[in-house]
Image: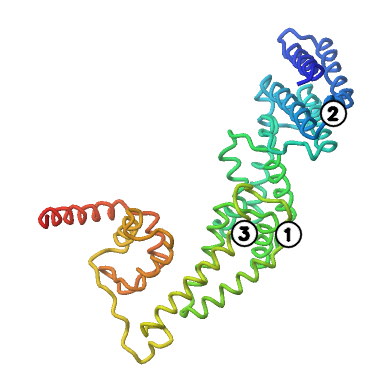
Amino acid sequence: MTSKLIWFERFIAHELRVISGAKCSPELLAYHRNRILDELELCKKEIFHIATAGATANSDIQYNVLSCQKVILRLKDMVYNLAPEFWKEFEVAKTQHVLYLTFQALEGLRAFLEEYFQPHYDFSEKISSIEMALLSNEIESALEEIRRRFLPYQHEPFFQALTSPFQGFLIKCSQRISVTQANYLRRYLTHINTIEVGVNRSDVYLCCVRSMFRYNLNSPRIFEFLTSEIQQDLDSLATHATKIRLLHAEAKKISQYYSKPDLCYRDNMSGLKDQLTDWIFAEMEYLRQEAEIQQAIGTTLENTIGQENLIKLRTNLSVNEMALLMRLSIEAGMIPPDNIAGTLKWAASTLQSKKATEISHESLRSKYYEPTTTSLVRVDKYLQVMRTILKQLD
């Protein structure tokens, strides 16, 4: 860090400490406020020289720009720490306060760096405590309005999926996010507020789904929601052929959705399109393989007309107990974990529970991930009996 940058940080920090003093008179406050704002206004030229000072390569400029970013961030955090309560409930009247004016001037310097040194700007740098507080306030107030607009037309799970980036930010608001993530949330929030909500539920739903792809909302919650929607449609179909046709149509539809280039919610995960198409093609491959197996043993659904029903294995287990045993078998390594969905579909189609001859694959899948206390106790008793039998066989 250059001597000029060190002096700049110390000067602003000193002035901020003075104005935060309990005995600072209005005249003295105005004097030091003007010193801060004048220095911040005049230092853009200095910042430019600091960023390029002694730079013989791009790496030198990048280092200098990053040093400037860190100084601006530290000063913003100092402004926040002088009066944290000031930023929690922000009002228009506060925009003339010296703290807000100082923050705005520092933000102007940061924007100057981003504009003139964009190739060298570090967008992974965390935002300040002030920006976290302001963004949190903005999202909280916006969510109330979004809920009021959308919920009459859409169900709660869809609303939760649509707003999951905002919900996730508010839940983890103690953890700072990067400049890129903050920009993403603001852009997505602005877009959601522009969606027209009419009386046609399907139109609103389709518009919102397009928005998820447009902004590459590649979060686990969105993936789970969209795949469960497709799965419900699949479960309503009887044959492998119709299911595969549906998946083909879904893959084509997803490929035609527009996604903004170089934009995503989570940069450490594959894009939403890739996630869904991978899942769809895996489902299609499973259905093809299952159809081939059934055809080989003469039990495809199309050839069962006029034949005896497929004999299923009867058990004394409830669906909850069956799902838990399947999970134990997979996690213990008795069954390969590479195709859990396929394993559960096979179990649902070939096993009977104690009370039902037909088991819903969806029911088995949900109970697989959420075992009940009763099923834990019952299965533990079965395992104890098995251990006793093993000792007798030894």
Determine the residue positioned at 59% across, 40% down: 170
Q: Earlier in the sequence, mark 3 or mark 2?
A: 2
Mark 2 crowdedness (10 Å alpha carbons): few <14, some 14-19, many ≥20:
some
Mark 1 crowdedness (10 Å alpha carbons): few <14, some 14-19, many ≥20:
few
| Farthest residue, direction top | 23
Q: Could you say which disc has been placed on residue 26 in the image? A: none
Identify the residue under disc 3: 152
Query: Amino acid under label 2?
Result: Thr
Number of numbered callouts drawn: 3
Query: Amino acid under label 1?
Result: Glu
Identify the residue under disc 1: 196
Mark 3 crowdedness (10 Å alpha carbons): few <14, some 14-19, many ≥20:
few
Judge depth for marks 3 and 1 and give the one in front: 1
Disc 3 and disc 1: Cα gap in Å? 13 Å
Q: Earlier in the sequence, mark 3 or mark 1?
A: 3
Identify the residue under disc 2: 52
Viewed as shown, does residue 190 lie left or right of 376?
right
Query: In the image, is residue 299 above or below residue 349?
Result: below
Query: Amino acid under label 3?
Result: Pro
Q: Secondary structure at mark 3?
A: loop
Disc 3 and disc 2: Cα gap in Å? 55 Å
Query: Front-most of 100 and 45?
Result: 45
